[in-house]
Image: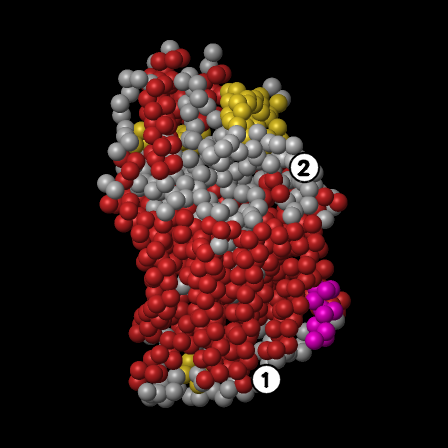
Amino acid sequence: MFKEFRPAVTSFLLLTLLTGIVYPLLVTGISQLAMPAKANGSLIVKDGKPVGSSLIGQSFSDPKYFWSRPSATGPMPYNPTASGGSNLGPTNPALLDAVKARVQALRDADPGNVQPVPVDLVTASASGLDPHISPAAAEYQLARVARVRNLEPDALRKLVAEHTEGRQFGILGEPRVNVLELNLALDAMR
Amino acid sequence: MSANGLPQIALYLGVLLALAKPLGWYMAQVYEGKLPVFVRWVVPAENLFYRLCGVDSRQEMRWTRYALAMLWFALLGVLAVYAMQRLQGMLPLNPQGLAAVSPDSAFNTAISFMTNTNWQGYSGESTMSYLVQMAALAVQNFFSAAAGMAVLVALVRGFARHTTETIGNFWVDMTRSIIYILLPLSVVLALVLVSQGVVQNLSAYQTAPTVETITYDNPKMDAEGNALKDASGNPVTEKATTKEQVIAKGPVASQEAIKQLGTNGGGFFNANSAHPFENPTPFSNFLAMLAIFLIPAALCYTFGSMVGDTRQGWAILLAMTILFVGFLAVAEYAEQQGNPAFTALGVDQDASATQPGGNMEGKETRFGIVNSALFATITTAASCGAVNGMHDSFTPLGGLVPLAQIQLGEVIFGGVGSGLYGMLVYAVIAVFLAGLMIGRTPEYLGKKIEAFDIKMASLVILLPPMLILGGAALAVMLAAGKAGVANPGAHGFSEILYAFSSAVGNNGSAFAGLSANTPFYNVALGLEMFFGRIWLMIPVLALAGSLAAKKRIPASIGSMATHTQMFVWLLIGTVLLVGALNFVPALALGPVIEHLNMINAH
């Protein structure tokens, strides 16, 4: 019964040291030396100060900005200390009410626009921190942002294209627009 | 599905199957002690380790002693993880000053990580210090995976050997799994993940100003810190504003790598692999999915190699792949169809060159439908349980796929070690059924399958449905069980059924709307995870011991070949039949009703 006790305790301690201390510190050390910007959160730095992360979205509700996807984090949207989705089921009336309200808010901000709304723009992301919207969701908002900012739509379209990433290596994932980077670039235009 | 869905899936399966042979060969060499030249420099350190531990690496164990060693190691794991969570406030590497975890949650998490389940009732970024994440949780990611691999190797030896009492040495199998397989792969994967943007640091959370001032409803608290509720039970809130975002960080990449390679699945953050710091790009997502299936697929080759007939391994791998592709097709189709109720609201759900379309609630833009449905199918075919989208918000049929795969026992690739030993048990059942049909004594790989073997195999097949259905039935009868449900109607039942399936199957994914961080669920699911793991490992080891003791009988004209197409389909049929008999009624009450409700409403 106790014959295996000593091997259990010793191997537990030694292997904990190896996999729980040495391994993560080794990876941390190499990452901090070789890829410090990525290892520290891909922070966007303006005037020497961090103004967000290019991987973590922010909430926008002003018509002059491109809006991010809805976020279900609490208590405020895009809260990186409480990541998560809404977990609303597909037939939950609360989900349908939320989508209806989001469609309405987009229409209120842009009364002339009667196109159907791209689905990613009215559904909450899984992380609640999704930094991206689909190119279709950017295009849907483009006329509004151009009007509020007195920009030529084509000039704005070019700026959106500059912040659009295609499929990785031409095949993986989905094309996407980084909302925070795009809005920071918009604010930097003037 | 968007036009490039099929190429992505084909690329994934192509790379996976191409890696199965080289890695599978390597693992067979490691477990047979014939270490390839390029790792022989580690051998002196390995031998020193055995000396320090008082292990004689040449001394083999009978199955009972092997099981005892495994149990001691598991017990220490539970105690250590529990203690470190309870003491975390006094331990270093806690820059956010997080306090001790509650006893019931710490119990649940300790069992969860020891059993390779990684069910998470807690929310990582607001609960666990960096030290607990690294030295308690990630350590169990290694240990539980290695224990699963060790038990599998013992079973394979049962088939490969004959007329012997012993099935290997647990300490050697477990140690070699870590230092020759899991650890080197993890180091490489972690560094590639950092290159994609996965964070790896020990600094405190970063506060940064936001572009807009955010207005939100802040829940009001009473003096004890509990949320205030109004007369109808809704939380009382007040308007608040913020101009800041607190960005959670930590040593994520190192944990992420072993979380996938060990099919553990416990996220550093609450959002798991949907979180941009755990899974920032489509390539990191591809690697995550590859890492989940890599070792389970390769172990099929290892098995074939160790029993001296690689065709046996390929046959099993083929059966797994066929089952997987079938389930994947359902998930992809259902999710791409989207939610019929949305279309009436003026929402565009059609896939195009500029949007993924489909059911995007609880999914990330960079993954779209293709990679979210693919990830969900992979993570539940294996016993991983990492998620890059919220299964609770999947369409009813899209959510049925993960649930059904877990209930089949996660033998489609499955957890590292546990998937293949589960599938080999199904193979034993399959030859038994075939033997009954033609009236011959069943045999598999030259071993006569007798009453004791079938009893052990039956335990492995029958215990999970008992635990899952019994647990779910108990929860829906108790107020404490029903209190956790988040979604109304049939979906609420699915949430409970999923929780017990996930716990017993040691998966760890969830229909996460269920509020499971309560004393009832923490204790009930904790016990289910324990029995779902340990009570299957012990009969598997008993089977290994019984098989090893048997004589090998030469194949005769009456033996059924087990590397043929017919056997592959027999195996697939057995898995699906056993699963269907056990779970169709329960599935009909959950996802099936919800699906009918959804399509009939429009």
Residue at far front of view: B231
Q: Is residue B280 left or right of residue B355?
A: right
* Depicted B67 relative to depicted B6: above or below: below
State the residue in front, B48 or B417: B417
Q: Residues within 10 Å of mark 2 (few under 14, many from 20)?
A: some
Residue A10 within the magenta-colored segment of the rendering? yes
Confirm whether the magenta stretch covers residue A55: no
Q: Amino acid at mark 2?
A: Gln
Asked which colour scheme the image uses, the reply is secondary structure
Relative image position of residue B248 (x, y in whole percent): 59, 36
* Bounds of the magenta segment: A1-11
Q: Nearer the viewer, mark 1 or mark 2?
A: 2
Amino acid on which disc 1 is placed = Glu
Subunit that carries the residue with mark 1: B
Which quarter of the rendered picture does the N terminus of chain A lie within?
A: bottom right
> In screen coordinates, is B372 left or right of B238?
left
- Apparent side of residue A48 relative to residue A59 in the rendered image (left or right): right
Q: From the image, tell me which residue sits under label 1.
A: B165
Label 1 to label 2: alpha-carbon separation = 53 Å
Secondary element under disc 1, as helix, strand or loop, is: loop
- Would you say residue B276 is visible in this rendering? no
Based on the displayed image, in which of its 4 quarters is residue A116 positioned?
A: top left
Residue behind mark 2: B96
For marks 1 and 2, the one nearer the N-term is 2
> Residue shown at 48%/42% (left/top)?
B274
